[in-house]
Image (cartoon, grey):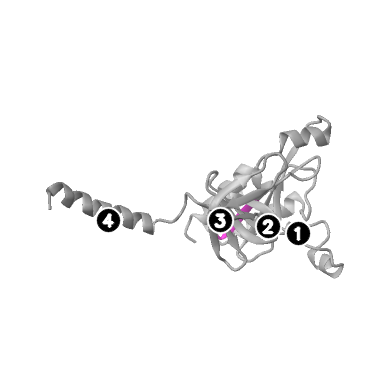
Amino acid sequence: MPIKSLIVFPLLILGLSASAASPMKDKSYVVTKTNDTIYGRIKANYLIGGVKLITADTSYKLDPNLYIAYYNAKNKVLYRSKILPGFVPRDLAKKMAIPENASWLKCIADGKIKLYEYKSHTFGKQMDNALDVTSAISSIVVTGGIPNVEYTSWFIEKDSSQLTSIKYNNVVSAGSKTRKERKELLKDMLADNDKVSQNYSQIKSFTFKAIEKLVHEYNNSKI
């Protein structure tokens, strides 16, 4: 066998092995309620809203009530299906038989502590929160040309704790607590990490950026 072939052949084998072993980070996917993963490509309808996962032989409408998560490879963003806190306490809502509808929340930080983002607008909720954009044409038609202001809400959970509002730029957020209570909540979540807890005590601001930095530091440090 020629020397060139002797070099190329092993390299080809190594390349195939690396490709087979590496995770499909460049592939979009949806996770079913039975924890099956379906790979494909994301297709969004920016005119009327809605997101689908397209595969070779079919398509899946990404309904947060039907699936538990999906990953948009193009934007490198993970979304999880979550039931947002409501103005009516969850236990009371169950007694009143108020149906629970899930929403797609953008995962800002993933680890022992998880941060999620949800966007809403002055004129109703976004056409599809997962798109990260509103339909410009629809907004103009619905609002009569009045600017549709965007609001951002962040939610937090640790281990199996209940999803709770931690930060928002609207006047009020469903299920939210006072600023003091939310600061205490974050303090309690960071308490088992002395270094991060100490950093938090030295920070006066309670901004989106500060919260994200603290959670990221917590998730990436050894307790």
Query: x and y percent of residue 90 in the render?
Result: 79, 64
Q: Amino acid at mark 4?
A: Ile
Residue drawn at (52%, 51%), measured in percent from left and top? 217
Mark closer to the chain start, 1 or 2 = 2
Give residue 64's mark.
2
- Secondary structure mostly seen in the magenta stretch: strand
In the image, the segment drawn in magenta is 112-116
- The one nearer the camera, 192 or 67, is 67
- The one nearer the camera, 133 or 113, is 133
Mark closer to the chain start, 3 or 4 = 4
Name the quadrant containing residue 160. bottom right
Kind of element beneath mark 1: loop
Give residue 101's mark.
1
User: Does residue 54 appear left or right of residue 139 in this picture?
Assistant: left
- The one nearer the camera, 118 or 19, is 19
Per the model, the C-alpha gap separating discs 3 and 2 is 22 Å
Per the model, the C-alpha gap separating discs 1 and 2 is 8 Å
Q: Amino acid at mark 1?
A: Asn
Give residue 13's mark.
4
Per the model, the C-alpha gap separating discs 4 and 2 is 41 Å
Q: Give the residue furthest to the right.
A: 96
Query: x and y percent of residue 131 in the render?
Result: 65, 44
Query: x and y percent of residue 108 in the render?
Result: 59, 49
Name the quadrant containing residue 75. top right
